[in-house]
């Protein structure tokens, strides 16, 4: 399989006052197009930082990070924002839905930056909400939806621009087990049926086991990269 993500000697250091705080130390990792990878490790291990670097939210201190052959660390802020909008779908633990907008409007938001007509946007949103099983909830606001339903709206929003890569930061962390399983089943479908590349941060071994591969980090170092057992 073709490598979508190529990481070599990747390091990230923040500063706390005058004190450098190393978070990632020389990470080497490849993720193939269409793969499904879980990033695991204790709090402070650097997994969320690595996810943010892959998503283009942050930039590395040193090393190489190529996604689809593009050195995203070399992009300017405007170029990087355009790259994220076209290539990355985001799923967060706390959904990040706009409370004043209904499900349809929340999912439509990324399309407002495109040249699609209103009719074309409606068609795309209806397909996305149907895919996550919420075609009958498109007029509901977030406070009228369960946690699991809100997360599925967030996944529909992540899919709406047909990104190559989906990054998920603790997507089941705020859900009960039944709702979590529904979200994980949906991610399985997105990977298996649509071929989306998924990189997911999780503390939950049951959640991590749904991925094809588990990558373990501790204190900024890659400890293991193993195939998950389904």
Image: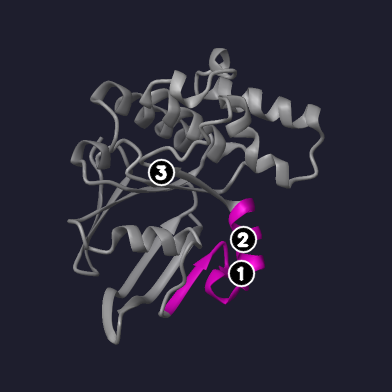
In the image, 132: left or right of 79? left
- Provide the secondary structure element on which disc 2 rests: helix
In the rendered view, tell whether residue 218 sits above or below residue 211.
below
Give the quadrant of residue 36: top left
How far apart marks 1 and 2 lie (CA) works out to 6 Å
Categorize mark 2 by other alpha carbons within 10 Å: few (<14), some (14-19), many (20+): few
The structure residue drawn at horizontal position 42% and vertical position 31%, both measured from the top left corner, is 151
Residue position for label 2: 81
Question: Residue placed farthest to the top in the image?
Answer: 136
Categorize mark 3 by other alpha carbons within 10 Å: few (<14), some (14-19), many (20+): many
- Residue 173, given in percent of the width and then of the height, sits at 28, 38
Magenta residues (range): 63-86
Judge whether residue 209 is colored magenta: no
Are the residues tagged 1 and 2 within 8 Å (C-beta)? yes
In the rendered view, tell whether residue 75 sits above or below residue 118.
below
Residue position for label 1: 77
Q: Earlier in the sequence, mark 2 or mark 3?
A: 2
Q: What label sits on residue 92 in the rendered view?
A: 3
The structure residue drawn at horizontal position 50% and vertical position 18%, both measured from the top left corner, is 133
Q: Nearer the viewer, residue 211 or 49?
A: 49
How far apart marks 2 and 3 lie (CA) works out to 18 Å
What quarter of the picture does the C terminus occupy? Answer: top left
- Provide the secondary structure element on which disc 3 rests: strand
In the image, 128: left or right of 209? right
Are the residues tagged 1 and 3 within 8 Å (C-beta)? no
- Provide the secondary structure element on which disc 1 rests: helix
How far apart marks 1 and 3 lie (CA) works out to 22 Å
- Residue 86, given in percent of the width and then of the height, sits at 64, 52
The structure residue drawn at horizontal position 32% and vertical position 42%, both measured from the top left corner, is 211
Give the quadrant of residue 48: bottom left
Question: Residue placed farthest to the bottom in the image?
Answer: 18
Judge whether residue 80 is colored magenta: yes
């Amino acid at each position: 399989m073709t490598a979508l993500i190529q990481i070599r000697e990747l390091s990230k250091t923040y500063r706390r006052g005058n004190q450098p705080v190393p978070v990632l130390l020389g990470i080497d990792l490849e993720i193939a197009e269409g793969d499904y990878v879980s990033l695991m490790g204790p709090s402070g291990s650097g997994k969320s930082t690595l996810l943010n670097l892959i998503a283009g939210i942050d930039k590395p201190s040193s090393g190489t990070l190529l996604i689809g052959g593009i050195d995203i660390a070399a992009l300017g802020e405007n170029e990087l924002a355009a790259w994220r909008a076209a290539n990355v779908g985001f799923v967060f633990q706390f959904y990040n839905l706009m409370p004043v907008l209904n499900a349809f409007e929340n999912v439509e938001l990324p399309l407002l930056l495109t040249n699609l007509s209103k009719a074309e946007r409606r068609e795309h949103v209806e397909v996305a909400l149907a895919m996550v099983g919420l075609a009958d909830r498109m007029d509901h606001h977030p406070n009228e939806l369960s946690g699991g339903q809100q997360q599925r709206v967030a996944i529909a929003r992540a899919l709406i621009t047909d990104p190559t890569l989906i990054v998920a930061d603790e997507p089941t962390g705020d859900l009960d087990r039944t709702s979590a399983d529904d979200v994980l089943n949906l991610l399985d479908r997105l990977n298996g049926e649509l071929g989306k590349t998924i990189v997911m941060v999780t503390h939950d071994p049951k959640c991590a086991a749904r991925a094809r591969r588990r990558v373990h980090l501790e204190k900024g170092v890659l400890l293991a990269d193993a195939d998950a057992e389904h």
